[in-house]
Amino acid sequence: MLKTYFKITLRNLWRNKLYSFINIAGLAMGIAAFILILQYVSFEKSVNGFHENIATTYRLLNEDPKGQTWPQVEPGWAQKAKDRFPEIQAYCRFEEGVGQGIVRRNAENAEPFRETNVGYAEGNFFEFFSFNVLEGSAAAFKKPNVVFLSTATAKKYFGKAEPVGQSLTLYNQFGKANYTVSGVYDIPVNSDIRYDMVFSLETLSNPANLNDNDWAQLDNLSSQYIHTYFRINETADYKKLEQKLTTLRNELKKDKDGLVFRLQPFANVHLPASFSDTYQTSGNLKYVYILSIIAILILAIAWFNYINLSTANALKRANEVGVRKVVGASRGSLVLQFLGESMLVNLISFGLALLIVRLLQPLFNTIIEKELTFTSLLSTPAWVAGLVLLIIGSLLSGAYTAYSLSGFNPVETLKGKLVKTTKAVVLRKSLVVFQFSISIGLLLATAFIYRQLNYMQNKNLGVNTDQLLVIRGPQVDKDSTYKMRRTAFINAIAQQSFVKDYSLSGSVPGNGYNFATSGFSQPGSRKGDELKSFSFALIDDRYLNTYQIGLAAGRTFTQAETMVDWNDNDKVLMNEKAIEELGFKSPEEALNTKVQWDERKLQVIGVVKNYHHIGLQKAIDPIIFYPQSNSAYFTVRLQTDRIQDNVAQLETMFKSYFRNNPFEYFFANDNFNKQYISEQQYSKLFTTASVWAIIIACLGLFGLATYTVEARTKEIGVRKVLGANVLTIARLLSKDFLQLVFIAFVIAVPVVWYAMYRWLENFAYKVQLSWWVFAAAGIVAIGIALLTISFQAIKAAIANPVKSLRTQ
Amino acid sequence: MIKITNLEKYYRTEEVETVALNKLSFEIKEGEFVAIMGPSGCGKSTLLNIVGLLDDADGGSFMFNGIEVAGFNERKRADLRKHNIGFVFQSFNLIDELTVFENVELPLIYTGVKAADRKTRVEEVLDKMQIMHRRNHYPQQLSGGQQQRVAVARAVVNKPKLILADEPTGNLDSSNGNEVMQLLTDLNEQGTTIIMVTHSEHDAKYSHRIIRMLDGQTVTENILV
Ligand SMILES: Nc1ncnc2c1ncn2[C@@H]1O[C@H](COP(=O)(O)OP(=O)(O)O)[C@@H](O)[C@H]1O
Ligand SMILES: [Mg+2]
């Protein structure tokens, strides 16, 4: 019996090739999208899961009264808390960013590298966290002046040579220091903590190694720069500990800042529901949710194709059902038969989907910006849930089909007059409407995300970042000759014919500010104004010129003014937003009034026109420009388009003045656009998802159109004999479907409008939800649907009516 | 074998109610060959479907082998049907996706006959219907006459006591039609009861008795034998 079912199913699939193709292709595409997305979700869920003690590990966070949180806390708390609270078994501290600098192997002619992904970490780092120490022992990290390297970094510095026992020099804000390589470790892809190299934090416990950076003292309770993780007793209530920690904070902290301590389970660090995330690799819970929903919707579209096409195909299957019933088939056996058929179709589709997944993996990985493989899928039990969903879905779609097909009354089907039950027709129409609502919704979302991205990338920023090359300033060998070498380098730059402008600054657009601080007032200020925060950018006399930023009033710095010592300077520039924040009515008023900054008096010598120093997600900040010939960045405006040659030339010059420093550069516009990576990712994702959904939905529409045309062949023939022309007939056949697509559009519009309205709230500068975009997307969707249907409609309309009448 | 009294059947659509069978009564004995005749739309097919347990009546009594089956639900009817009744239709109603052999085998599958037995039995009837050489063909590769022979083979493979034929020669030319009529006659001679709906006086002559219907009622009965 099973064998005949199987046989008849395969023969059925083979006979109705078009129908089978549409069904299987649609399902395979749906399942493939689902598997790919499940991979991603699985991976995200698996992050950090390899740490053995993840369940009892918590991250300490600061939270301000506004509910903002950040993981950089003062380094002194860890030991104080452990001494006070017995439920804390251990702690581990590490910092990110503070230790950045240049690292060079201690060997003749060794190449220096800038290392940004490095930091100082507690001696127990390799015991507290479950990283694999491949060479050396975890305990060796407890000593000062010890460095552990990731396998890739070890290779970068030492090639095939044995790294353990070798030494490196680190140049950073703590001066120049020697470190012995005592270990090599491996970091799994699903780890949030991803150091290229870690220096022992113990080094900084020696005041001599701090290079006068007293803020970094490991027992201090005033500088927030270190990440702190606690391991607590299994039975301890971390919420209670959280409160006790805040009490401790209030007790020991002299200047009350209103902050409280929060403990975040390590398990939630990667996909935080509310706490702000901090890691480069940190996932985005929202993104994971959106992806999961898209996966399920696409899968639903594919299953609806199956239901629609199978029930439409019922016209053909009805006779078979009738005959089987006449010769003795019970309804149950028919249900089983059709269910088996649907299972087989789903199974074939599943096999095909695996193939598609293989083919599309690289493309998907670029969209998602992850290195996922099929095994990522198996890293958490999420795949079980996925499989269950797949099975339930195929069972349900199969069950519906089986139920409706097996219900045919043989007396009627054998008469060849299958009564179209209105229930089935309504369902089919609803499913088509659903499929197109989703497709059109995704299409609309894509349009708006793309427009917003485009807007941000093309809006006039008030600063010209084209052809601006930015070179990172040197950090190694900042000795007594450094100032002289820097001047010589600048002079050499100035003499190049391809250099149009150049500048030295501490911050450049797209890379944030030097720092932000408060405590500003002017005679006209109201009480509380001194709490307002202002961002600082350190610039030289050529910055505004080089970046082509306008002045609203006054003048910029002179070269002499940029040479004045930090504490002796009393001249600043402010942007329009800053003087507005300070309560000045006009730029002129600002120029004529002294501004108080704590104990110091500042003269505003110029007002800078507002420009976007950071991405358009954020409103323009109040900025104070402070004169400095700081060498964090050299910016050069290139005049020619022989950029390769110019860069090579600049590198030679740079190397001749700053021998042991790496030459690192970027283009200001690329750097600025990096701030839109998340939006770019959304844009790519939605484009792909909408194309995918539309293809699957159109496959289904094409199938339905084919059936409708088949079922109406005779009617079309009669109409043609009576004189209807091709256009009337094509219109007759297309009308019903276009109506459905139009209804889908009407449903999609308000949903997308609301979703996009919410999304655009993330941006200070945004596009309008213009009606014409909706209209255009609607026209595109209806156009695509029309194209899909018209193929069959026109084919039927131009067919010879004599033929179609004869076949009936 | 069959005793029908005051059988009623209505078809209701939104506006109209059609009386397909109007208090119809007759009786058929085991081993009879009965032809049912009458103008189009008089209720012949409706009657055959009810007798064949494909459909149920709206009133009256239907005794099948001494059992009242008028109130049977679908499952019970299907059960009784698959062991006792074979059908032959005007439009053959073979399953296009199955071969000749598989089409004939189908009733045996649903009555749970073992595969080995099925093979001998199917081959036996195919032989008898002289269609054995086409056993691996699909219905569409056969002529109308051959298709109807396959349909008859399928109807008899389960050795039913009753065969119902609804215009079995309606789609056939006269020589093919005669062949089918001969088959039915042979079956009847071997003891199978046959009820046949037909428009053809010629075909009706093969039967023992003709029941003539008009507007859902029997009007006359001609006994031929
Ligand atoms: N499914 C149905 N719905 C409504 N009316 C029907 C249906 N089937 C048959 N009829 C009506 O019942 C009457 C008898 O039909 P039928 O038994 O097919 O006649 P015959 O086979 O004698 O030509 C006719 O008037 C026909 O129109
Ligand atoms: Mg009839």
Image (tube, coloured by chain):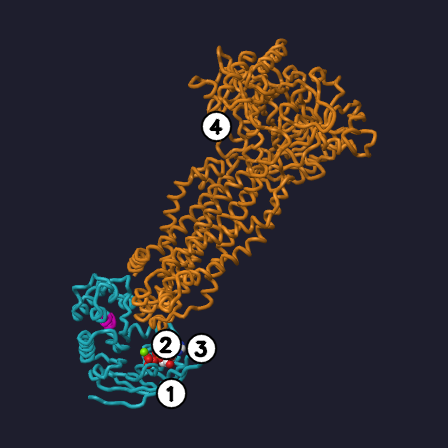
Chain colours: A orange, B cyan
Q: Amino acid at mark 3?
A: Thr
Q: Residues within 10 Å of mark 2 (few under 14, many from 20)?
A: many
The chain identifier of the residue carrying mark 4 reads A
Using the image, determine if residue A741 lies above or below residue A556: below
Residue at 28% in and 85% down: B28
Q: Amino acid at mark 4?
A: Asp
For the question of whether residue A531 can be seen, the reply is no
Q: Which residue is mark 2?
A: B55
Q: CA distance from mark 3 to mark 4?
A: 77 Å
Q: x, y (%) of residue A54?
A: 55, 36
Magenta residue span: B151-158
Instruction: Kindly identify which numbered label has been placed on residue A186.
Output: 4
Q: Between residues B177 and A460, which one lies in front from this camera angle?
A: A460
Q: CA distance from mark 4 to mark 2?
A: 75 Å
Q: Secondary structure at mark 2?
A: loop
Q: Which is more N-terminal, label 3 or label 1?
A: 3
Q: x, y (%) of residue A423?
A: 47, 67
Q: Which residue is mark 1?
A: B23
* Residue B24 found in image quarter: bottom left
Q: Which is more N-terminal, label 3 or label 2?
A: 3
Secondary structure character of the magenta stretch overall = helix
Residue at 65% in and 29% down: A78
Q: CA distance from mark 2 to mark 3?
A: 17 Å
The answer as to whether the residues below labels 2 and 3 share one chain is yes
Q: Which mark lies nearer to you, 3 or 4? A: 3
